[in-house]
Image (tube, helix red, strand yellow):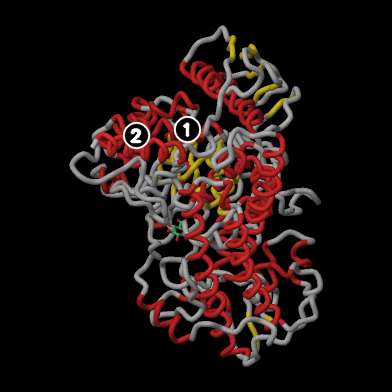
Amino acid sequence: MKTIVHLVIFVLVSISVYAEDGHNLWLRRLNPKPVNVVCIKNSSTVSLAKQELQNGWMGEAGASVNLVIKTDKAIRGDGFRINANSIQANTELGILYGVYELLRRQQTGEAIQEEICNPSYERRILNHWDNLDGSIERGYAGQSIFWRKGNDAYTITETDKTLWQEYARANASIGINGAVLNNVNASQLMLTNECLQRVKAIAEVLRPYGIKTYLSVKFSSPAQIGGLKTSDPLNPEVAQWWKDKVKEIYSLIPDFGGFLVKANSEGQPGPQDFGRTHADGANMLANALNPFGGIVMWRAFVYSASDEDRAKQAYLEFMPLDGQFRDNVIIQVKNGPIDFQPREPFSPLFGAMKKTTVMPELQITQEYLGHSVHLAFLSPMWEEFLQSDTYQEGAGSTVARCTDGRIFPQKHSAIAGVANIGLDANWCGHPFAQANWYAFGRLAWNSSIRSEQIADEWIKLTFEGTGNTNEATLDQTMDWNLNFLSPVKQMMLDSREAIVDFMMPLGLHHIFSANGHYGPGPWWAPKGMRKDWTPPYYHQADSLGIGFDRTESGSNGVGQYHEPLRSVFTNLATCPEAYLLWFHHLPWDYKTKSGRTLWSELCYHYDGGVQQIRHFQQVWDRIERYVDRDRFVDVQKRLRDQSLNALEWKDACLLYFQKFSRMPVPYDLERPMYNLDYLIEKDTKRVGVYHH
Ligand code: BDP
């Protein structure tokens, strides 16, 4: 009996040594050394900074580090000056950020010379699409960390607080300084006192880490919970109701950030219900928030049920309002003109609204990139977007420069990412999805870092020292770099393009099935459905060709871009092939740059995407000995599912489009493995969201 007990204990201990559930994210602290921290100021944020240094110091044992709070004009906002033994900042938060930077560099082996690091954006915000019942719209990593249903929905437990604190720490470590705690499809109940009390409790945990709380609000709240007859923004009682509500919020949460609003979009109420404009609505809320320093983030994700090309609609609605918004209103624009597709050109609103503050909205959760099944590193997509040249103020007017205050002087600057965080032990579902949370924070802090660097850092912080290898010798480090870091990094960097290839290459977009946005559905068009909610509207395939004509002969979506882009996209010789079918409807035998027909080119892309995922499986199997068992098996399993899904995408799209092209799949490519009828049938049986 005794031996059995010993054996059980031994097994448990060994498991706990090697088990890595991913909960510590990129903040695993390995073998810290003693350090002496000197700082005259004391506050909760500064003591967090000290504690982090003490728990994570990997520099010289027994070294002294100075933390200095001193005003310096070269340092902006919560930026900092760093060198190997000191951090200087204007603010306490700057000190904390400097500490995280120093520790990251020690752990990843990056050089630490004297340097000033300033944030690109003033506000770096996560948007949680969390509902008050604990479910998460487009969430693939479990229930909400903030909300739950049931009798104890509003009880604040120690477990809640611990989780919120871990969440705050993870965000602060990558520079995120704001969180919208509830879904943009907001419930009016969000503004009831019961909910606000919970927000207050969350805000108290987040505050020492420099994270402000924001809320999504429902525009019809005054009528729904305030007992008013209307929610018309120009009605004085309505304006007063919001003023009182805002006052109540600030009495509970003195550093409250402000509101996020989805209005007159996808059935949400808004000022247009009362014959008013987006500006009327946003300004009314801005007036209420202004005395407290709060902001309004007003979303431009709108598309009315008109015949107008959906890609043009946000621009058509918002451009005429340029110059009418208060200076504490920020228009929040999704990166692309349609909806978080695997690839879209940038939204033409960037750089075009010159008298209005505009902020990008990115989607970290992989709604359209394979949920938490696919390995998709999104940083290259965001880098492509941020570095896109809008030409609005001459060459070099990148989206980043148009939104971070470098081109347009504006009171605020901000960037948002729709979070992929839930109650799953590893927070994000797929172990590699953590890299997207990480990348969002890093890019929001510094929009010019390259994806390669972000991947490099993340892999080191996340995986180093977790395999069967012991304390690393020089040889082992070289081996690790060569046989783990480098192939895994390459896989991450290639992963988004692989998805574009097997889902919707050459500028195709929104050909998903039904509401789940996971599998293929180029045929999906139930009777009576709004046209712009069905794939055939987007691919426009017919016997003559495929693609959406957005040139002057079509919807003239190109007209919303600044020259020379308008001409570049219009002219087939210059239009990047990645956007070919986004802007053009072309014949099946159109000759692409490779000399192939358009049809063959499509086939090669779809097939290439599938082959790439199979290659990722090989890469992953080969690195087995460098990773802890749990994460190895987990990723291996997800890659298998991704491979199967890729094959479905390829077969579904090619077999369906072949009905129009009537051309053979090039004979050197693998033949289809599925029948189209089977895939269509399977799709009709799939209930909404894909279950892993
Ligand atoms: C779409 C999502 C939907 C969101 C909407 C939005 O499918 O769940 O509510 O965007 O951003 O992509 O408002």
407 sits left or right of 439 in the view: right
User: Looking at the picture, does residue 341 appear above or below residue 53?
Assistant: below
Q: Whole-percent x and y of residue 342?
A: 58, 62
Q: Residue at x 34, y 34 (%)?
A: 199
Q: Whole-percent x and y of residue 402?
A: 69, 45
Give the residue furthest to the top.
Answer: 40
Quarter location, residue 7? top left
| Element under disc 2 | helix
Q: Quadrant of the N terminus?
A: top left
Q: Is mark 2 within 8 Å of ligand 1?
A: no
The quadrant of the picture showing ligand 1 is: bottom left
Q: Amino acid at mark 1?
A: Gly
The answer to which of marks 2 and 1 sits earlier in the sequence is: 2
Residue 302 in view in this figure? no
User: Looking at the picture, does residue 357 appear above or below residue 81?
Assistant: below
In depth, the one of 129 and 557 nearer the eye is 129
Q: Quadrant of the C terminus?
A: bottom left
| Element under disc 1 | loop
How far apart are the alpha carbons under marks 2 and 1? 16 Å
Residue that badge 2 annotates = 199
501 sits left or right of 431 in the view: right
Q: Which mark is residue 294?
A: 1
Q: Whole-percent x and y of residue 585?
A: 66, 80
User: Looking at the picture, does residue 500 appear above or below residue 525?
Assistant: above
Q: Residue at x 70, y 84 (%)?
A: 668
Give the residue furthest to the left.
Answer: 151
Residue 150 in view in this figure? yes
In depth, the one of 53 and 351 nearer the eye is 53
Q: Which mark is residue 166?
A: none
Q: Residues within 10 Å of mark 1 (few under 14, many from 20)?
A: many
Q: Residue at x 70, y 78 (%)?
A: 601
